[in-house]
Image (cartoon, rainbow, N blue to C red):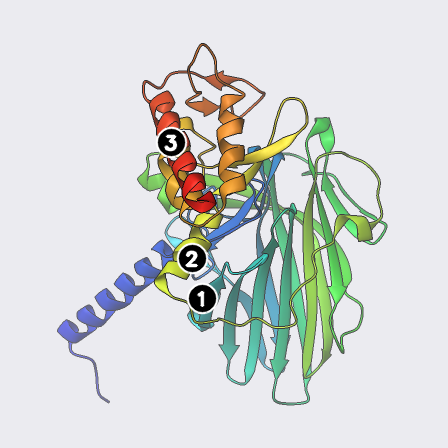
Amino acid sequence: MLTEDPTQLADRVAREMAEFDRCLSREWLLTNGRGGFASGTSIGVPTRRYHGLLVAAARPPLERWMLLSTTLERVETLGVTAETPGFCFGDVFHPRGFDQQVDFAVSNRGPIGWVRFVYAWGDLSLTKSVHMARGLDEVAISYRLETTRPVPVALAVCPFAAMRDFHHLTRAFDGGFPFAELDGQLVVGGRDGSPRLLLRAEAGEGTRDVLFEPQPDWWYGFHYREEAHRGQDCREDLFMPGWFKVSGMGSVSFVLRAAADFTGEERAASERFTMVLPASLTEPESTVQERLVEAADAFVVRRRRADGSESTTILAGYPWFGDWGRDAFIALPGLLLETGRFDEAREVLSTFASAQQDGLIPNRFSDYGDGCDYNSVDASLWYIHGADAYLRNISSCVY
């Protein structure tokens, strides 16, 4: 029996750990143009309190809520029962679905951004794709489980709800969040004026109806290592209302849709979930310039003003920043002028001009309410710089 040399073993383990750390540090981001987003790591393990599948803004682009944190998938067929993706609980990762991950891809091109994970166990494979569209507080997670053999297969998906301000963390409490099935959708939360998470499952082609099995419970002690590195509180408990389940022969597919509800109004599910998913996901080749333009688009969002009107603004960064004056006008020439988005550039100038006070451009808008902070010595100067760049670009286009 051959054994691995201790030195070679140590080197191999070190390489595997380095690759694992690299995957944990490789993050993806989808945005909806309203301050909301979905984000995570390339192997599906959340490492920040800001990693989640549906973060939505109650007062775009701010007052953001972490509603749907993550999902747990369980696949079953003859001789195989496995779960994905994986979560950190201190020194332990469970489950370890990332060990079976064979592909990862992400695209922000077009009106619907997506990220895709593929897992394989022999001839059994699971494809999970997360979709987020511009202008909607909605995310759609599509699944396809398939094998080359005509054998029974089953897929169960458990959503984990955080239902919190996205800067905070959730702690378990007696009873958990209220939830109920209503008009073909599962409604989670909504007490004390807080937003609701709406969930709806739609069977795919050749798949029978998706069944929901209530099983309310808490999972305790999710550990977010990037928060730990920042010296922040890094442990959270997440609530699971139950499981969405499908079964079939050879293959099954379904879509789990999640939407934020800040109104509490009773509306049909068809009015809540409006995203039209693409027929297929392709990864078009793109130049560095095209990829930069796609990345720039994530920071250009809509702001709801105090009078109810909307205009364009620029976020200072993800995951936690809002729209800051100096950052907006440092970035405006590259994000909007170089890309030819002059109307939106004018709106950004108008957004901040409407909030000026005694000649001062606000350093930042409040995360909560309609207040502003006027504590930047150079935000007004950067505003003038941005306005000058805008006028020069407009003049060159006209003449």
Residue 67 in the figure: left or right of residue 284 = right
Give the amino acid at mark 2: Phe
Q: Position of residue 221 (x, y in %)?
A: 48, 44
Residue 130: quarter of image: bottom right
The residue that appears at 54% across and 85% down in the rendered structure is: 123
Give the amino acid at mark 3: Asp
Residue 190 in the figure: left or right of residue 80 = right
**Which residue in the structure is indicated by mark 3?**
388
Sequence order check, earlier mark of 3 and 2 = 2
Tell me, yes or no, whether the two marked residues, 1 and 2, touch with CB atoms within 8 Å.
Answer: yes
Q: Which circle marks residue 35 in the picture?
A: none
Q: Which circle marks residue 93 in the picture?
A: 2
**Label 1 element class:** helix
Residue 181 in view: yes
Mark pair 3, 2: CA separation = 53 Å
Q: Is residue 222 above or below residue 265?
A: below
The residue that appears at 64% across and 65% down in the rendered structure is: 142
Sequence order check, earlier mark of 1 and 2 = 2
Dot 3 crowding, Cα within 10 Å, few <14, some 14–19, many 20+: few
